[in-house]
Amino acid sequence: MKAVVYPNFGSPDVLECRDIEKPTPGDDEVLIKVRAASINPLDWKLMKGGPFIMRLLLGLGKPKLKRPGVDVAGEVEAVGKNVTQFKPGDPVFGTCYGAFAEYATSKSVTGMKSALVAKPDNVTFEQAASAPVAALTALQGLRDKARIETGQKVLVNGAAGGVGTFAVQIGKSFGANVTGVCSTRNVDLVRSIGADQVIDYTQQDCTKSSQRYEVVLDCVGNHSFSEWRRVLNPKGIFVGVGAPPDVPLSRLLAGLIGALVQSVFVSQKLAVFMARVNEQDLTTLGELMATGKVTPVIDRRYRLSEARDAFLYMEAGHARGKVVITPED
């Protein structure tokens, strides 16, 4: 079968589309015939090897895990002997190992649990593959960390990105008044997915606005907690889910520690987290998509043989919504 692999850590130039052996599912695993997969920042960060401390998990010299991709949608090809909830032919979506391939297994790797659920009939494979990590981050950030309520004012920084486009729509589904922050070229897009107000960051610094918000969901990481406090209500909460791609880990950790210390002495709350993959929340996302409350924004589509170009585009940081990769056929 065809699969994207990276034999060495590095830039997207290390990616290769090769013929490899078709995987066999373990006793508790599902073999998926991949119909679509999508790229997350996690994918290219793992490809580069991440911070040096991560090499203890990823491999000191060469990568232990050589197949990228976790977001997947497709059809069940085969199941292990202990799997009872799926059968061959079932359409599914969720997370797996090695999604950029013709076939992939629902194997958990690198601390990320694998989970699959049934794909709604009226949701395309590309839409379903766009959702797992990005939409889970938006859902859990707003619902679980911010405890979003009807009528609250919510600001989404980076509203045109993968997480941001889901956050705008999920915020609206909870009855919030949502303001999206994006660049000039994305203003119409963010407005079209339901944002009540849109701030063009090239024209206005959103942290100096006179408006106040109960919730700020930051998908970018380009402002400090002190700056965000200026637009938070006294009892508001800042939820950080993103960071600039070119900032060293040491500086990010220093900034996070400083913000955590500061949050102890002020009334506003601070939360930073990574999404947890679970079947219940994936099912919730499926329902939101099936009812039309959430429609994934897909920027570009690539074939497996074009994975290098897809990663380069994603790495440039200008993707609107999600970037999807599909098998050659």
Image: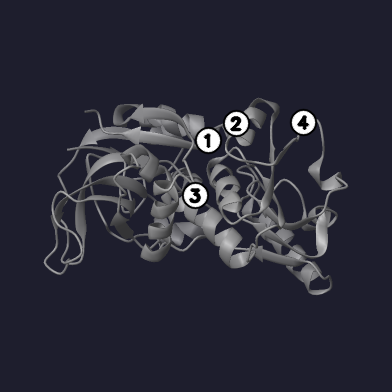
Specify few, some or many for label 3: CA neighbours under 10 Å numbering under 14, 14-19, or 20 or more: many
Mark identifier at residue 189: 2
**Residue 182: image location, x then y, percent:** 68, 36
Return the disc, 3 or 1, that comes first in the chain's sequence: 3
Q: Is residue 191 above or below residue 128?
A: above
Check the image and name the residue furthest to the bottom.
264
Question: Mark 4 against mark 2, which lies toward the viewer?
Answer: 2
* Relative depth, front residue between 163 and 265: 163
User: Is residue 306 visible to the viewer in this orientation of the structure?
Assistant: yes
Q: Residue 202 carries which label?
A: 4
Q: Mark 3 points at which residue?
A: 134
Lower sequence index among marks 3 and 4: 3
Q: Do residues under tags 2 and 3 come within 8 Å of each other at their CB atoms? A: no
Q: Does residue 155 sit above or below 29 in this rendering?
A: above
| Discs 2/3, front | 2
SS for dot 4: loop
How many other residues sit within 10 Å of disc 2, few (<14), some (14-19) or many (≥20)?
Answer: some
The tag earlier along the polypeptide, 2 or 3, is 3
| Amino acid type, callout 1 | Glu
| Mark 2 touches mark 1? (CB < 8 Å) | no
Name the residue carrying label 1: 315
Amino acid carrying label 2: it is Leu
C-alpha span from label 3 to label 4: 25 Å
Residue 5 in sight from this viewpoint: no
Q: Which quarter shows the C terminus?
A: top left
Q: Which amino acid does label 3 sit on?
A: Ala
Q: In which quarter of the image is residue 9?
A: top left
